[in-house]
Amino acid sequence: MPRIERQLAASRPWVFAILALGSAAITAGSLAYFDAGAAAPFVVEKLPLPHEQLWLLWLRVHVAAAAFALPACLVLASHTVLRRAPRVHRWLGRVAGAVMLLALAPSGFYLSLFAKGGLPSTLGFVLSGAIVVVATVEGVRAARAGRFADHRLWMLHVLAQLSVAVTSRAMLFAFDAADVNADVAYLVSLWLPVVASAVLVEMAAPRPRRRTQSTPAKGEGVDGFCPVSRDCATHLHPDLGGIHEAPPRHHQLVDAPAQLGDVARVAS
Ligand code: HEM
């Protein structure tokens, strides 16, 4: 396993805990947006807006969708849930995918038109939202086709972009404490995590090997195919949504060539 992958695997529990806490803190701080009587600073500094009620509606949709999407993606990334409760993974994945495609991203795109920092800021949010949309669609398609290595990579991109909400706010706090110009701080705190998250995923989870034959030979399974049984390709096919209901012992989800050795050992 490359060094960067090893380091990221070791820091995984900490990263997940920080993201879960960050998500909870952001949600708690956003409750004021649902109180008609309260004038939250983030809302007040936006005024006047051309369609104030519409903007407020999209903001509420956005906050509610985000409060669900980030924790849901953390649960979906859990190996334990995938192994012990594949049905939960599959159903939560469907709901989270729908929430991201129908609520989180569209609301983010609308809000981005009035974002602090003007056009550069709008473009940063649109880039992040576009990565989420493309990665979610491709990730779902990959899972349905049984291409689990692709699925994992795309969904890591989704999680990485959702994590920008947390890293970006942490950076804003740091810049504020260091008295950095607020406009510069806002742009850097947006663009840096968006780009860095995408680069980090590509570095840490390299592109999976492409499948060159319809059925893998014994011991050659990659990307969702069992390396043990030639027939396994059909077992893993889309009818199961890419996930075994009750996997036979040797049918492991192989999502990286590095795991092939382990699976072959389990089977022998
Ligand atoms: C598809 C990914 C996302 C996009 C494109 C996006 C986009 C945006 C935009 C454009 C704004 C308005 C910023 C401004 O007016 O300056 C915003 C605000 C907000 N977003 Fe997101 N966002 C995304 C994901 C998330 C996530 C995952 C969370 C929470 C974990 C989140 C929580 C919030 C909150 C609470 C606000 C209100 C502003 C605040 O209280 O800081 N967003 N988002």
Image (cartoon, helix red, strand yellow):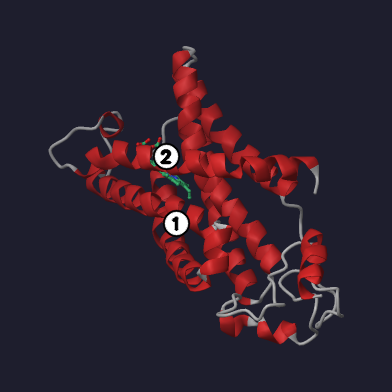
- Residue 125 can be seen in this image: no
Q: Identify the residue position indicated by label 2 in the image.
A: 21
Quadrant position of residue 152: bottom right
**Can you tell which mark lies on residue 189?**
none
Q: Earlier in the sequence, mark 2 or mark 1?
A: 2
Residue at (44, 44) in percent of width and height: 20
265 with respect to 143 (left or right): right
Residue at (80, 45) in percent of width and height: 2
As shown in the figure, which amino acid type bears the numbered disc 1?
Ala
Quadrant including the C terminus: bottom right
Residue 260: % across, % down: 80, 66
Q: Nearer the viewer, residue 30 or 57?
A: 30
Residue 253: % across, % down: 68, 70
Single out the residue that lies furthest toward the top. Answer: 179
As shown in the figure, which amino acid type bears the numbered disc 2?
Leu
Reply above or below: 184 against 227.
Answer: above
Calculate the distance from the C-alpha at mark 2 to the C-alpha at mark 1: 13 Å
Reply above or below: 28 against 156.
Answer: above
Distance from mark 1 CB to nearest ligand 1 atom below 8 Å? no
Q: Identify the residue position indicated by label 1 in the image.
A: 72
267 with respect to 77 (left or right): right
Q: Quadrant of ligand 1?
A: top left
